[in-house]
Image (cartoon, rainbow, N blue to C red):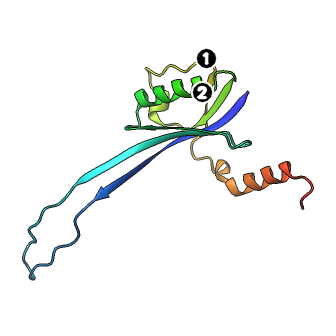
């Protein structure tokens, strides 16, 4: 049995041409480049071993999340996997089919005790190296 923490993040570039200089009261005339290029990175990390699985997608929706779950299930087909996830809308889509070897564990909303990563990291270091003070 393996436990993974899963989330997704958007990475992108929103480019604009800088300011235009004009006389006072004159509206600047120029071309704006409202181009936004982005991608979503879906990832799952096993906190104890640091093993990770990442896949890049174009959107954050149920269809892409289904593909992520299918790929994750194939990559870890020999184990039973628990994925801790947030309560995103597409994590609970009606069309979502969770693979046989994956269980989705939804974390409670507004749960500050799950954000204590420095304390958890320190605990993991102490457990892995008990001889250190």
Left or right of 5 on screen, residue 87? left
Left or right of 126 on screen, residue 43? left
Which is more toward the observer, 124 or 87? 124
- Mark 1 lies on a secondary structure that is loop
Q: Say how many tags the image has.
A: 2
Which is more toward the observer, 103 or 36? 36
Q: Position of residue 103 (x, y in %)?
A: 63, 25
Q: Position of residue 81 (x, y in %)?
A: 66, 27
The relative height of residue 75 versus residue 51 in the rendered view (above or below) is above
Q: Which residue is mark 1?
A: 100
* CB under 8 Å between discs 1 and 2: no
Q: Quadrant of the N terminus?
A: top right
Left or right of 62 on screen, residue 104? right
- Mark 2 lies on a secondary structure that is helix
Which is more toward the observer, 96 or 128? 128
Q: Position of residue 79 (x, y in %)?
A: 70, 23
Rendered residue at 58%/24% (across/down): 73
Say which mark, if any, is on residue 75. 2
Earlier in the chain: of badge 1 and badge 2, it is: 2
Name the outermost residue toward the bottom: 24
Rendered residue at 57%/19% (across/down): 99
Rendered residue at 43%/20% (across/down): 95
Q: Tag 1: Cα neighbours inside 10 Å, few (<14), some, or many (≥20)?
A: few
Rendered residue at 45%/26% (across/down): 93
The relative height of residue 77 versus residue 89 in the rendered view (above or below) is above
Q: Position of residue 118 (x, y in %)?
A: 70, 57
Q: Tag 2: Cα neighbours inside 10 Å, few (<14), some, or many (≥20)?
A: few
């Amino acid at each position: 049995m393996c436990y993974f923490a899963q989330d997704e993040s958007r990475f992108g570039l929103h480019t604009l041409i800088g300011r235009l200089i004009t006389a006072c009261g004159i509206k600047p005339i120029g071309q704006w480049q409202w181009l936004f290029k982005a991608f979503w990175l879906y990832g799952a990390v096993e906190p104890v071993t640091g093993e990770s699985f990442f896949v890049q997608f174009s959107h954050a929706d149920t269809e892409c999340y289904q593909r992520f779950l299918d790929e994750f299930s194939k990559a870890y087909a020999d184990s039973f996997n628990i994925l801790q996830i947030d309560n995103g809308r597409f994590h609970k889509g009606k069309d979502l089919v969770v693979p046989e070897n994956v269980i989705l564990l939804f974390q409670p909303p507004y749960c500050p005790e799950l954000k204590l990563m420095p304390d958890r990291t320190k605990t993991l270091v102490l457990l892995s190296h008990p001889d250190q003070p």
